[in-house]
Amino acid sequence: MRKKVPKIIVDSLMLITLIITLVTMRGNMIVHTVIGGMFTLLMAIHIFQTIKWTKAMSKNFKKIKPKIRRQYIVNKVLITMWVICIITGILAGVHTLTGIDALFPVRRIHGITGAVAFALTIVHCIQHSKRLIGLFKFKRPRPQAA
Ligand code: HEM
């Protein structure tokens, strides 16, 4: 129970910040950048919270079931997409502020990797849906013997 609450908070905030980041991508760039930055921070916490699983899977990669192996591979592609999306997002901001022409292509790369990362995030949530549902299952305390 005590371990689940921080995970529920982080996962829920990730969902909220991701939705706000998406709906502001063609509108309010300040909100998009600030909330996108918050999402990035939450993602780092989420990775830290699940590091044990990742380490165990990479150690036993050859022995694990194909289904878990697929989850692991999707996670790796997902983090790569998010890292490119975040770096190009920062560079898109630098482009806006400085107007350096050479930086123009990063805007497109940012949009594309953002869309791919978002699609993969949905796959990631489906793959780990059991864990997500498990977070909301709390064990009832046993009645005390009289
Ligand atoms: C959900 C995934 C994301 C999508 C689909 C997305 C999409 C976009 C799009 C379409 C633009 C406008 C590009 C243009 O005007 O040509 C943009 C700009 C930007 N995005 Fe994202 N983005 C995402 C996530 C993020 C994240 C996580 C960050 C945080 C680092 C971020 C930071 C930025 C910045 C700094 C800009 C430039 C703002 C400016 O022009 O001043 N984005 N994004």
Image: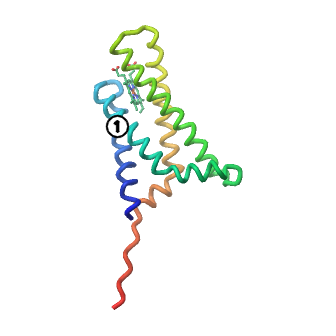
Outermost residue on the right side: it is 62
Q: Is residue 86 above or below residue 58?
A: above
- Color style of the picture: rainbow
74 sits to left or right of 135: right
Q: At x 49% / y 51%, what residue is drawn? A: 50
Q: Quadrant of residue 93?
A: top left
Quadrant assignment for the C terminus = bottom left
Q: At x 60% / y 53%, what residue is drawn? A: 56
Circle 1 crowding by C-alpha within 10 Å: few under 14, some 14–19, many from 20: some
Q: Which of the four quarters of the rendered structure image does ligand 1 lie in?
A: top left
Number of numbered discs on residues: 1
Outermost residue on the top side: it is 101
Identify the element where label 1 is drawn. Answer: helix
Q: At x 41% / y 71%, what residue is drawn? A: 139
Quadrant assignment for the N terminus = bottom left
Amino acid type at image mark 1: Met
Q: At x 49% / y 34%, what residue is drawn? A: 117
Q: Residue 10: x and y, percent?
A: 37, 49
Q: Residue 103: x and y, percent?
A: 44, 13
Q: Nearer the viewer, residue 106 or 50?
A: 50
Outermost residue on the bottom side: it is 146
64 sits to left or right of 89: right
Q: Quadrant of residue 29?
A: top left
Q: Which residue is mark 1?
A: 38
Q: Residue 3: x and y, percent?
A: 41, 60
Q: Is residue 106 above or below residue 9?
A: above
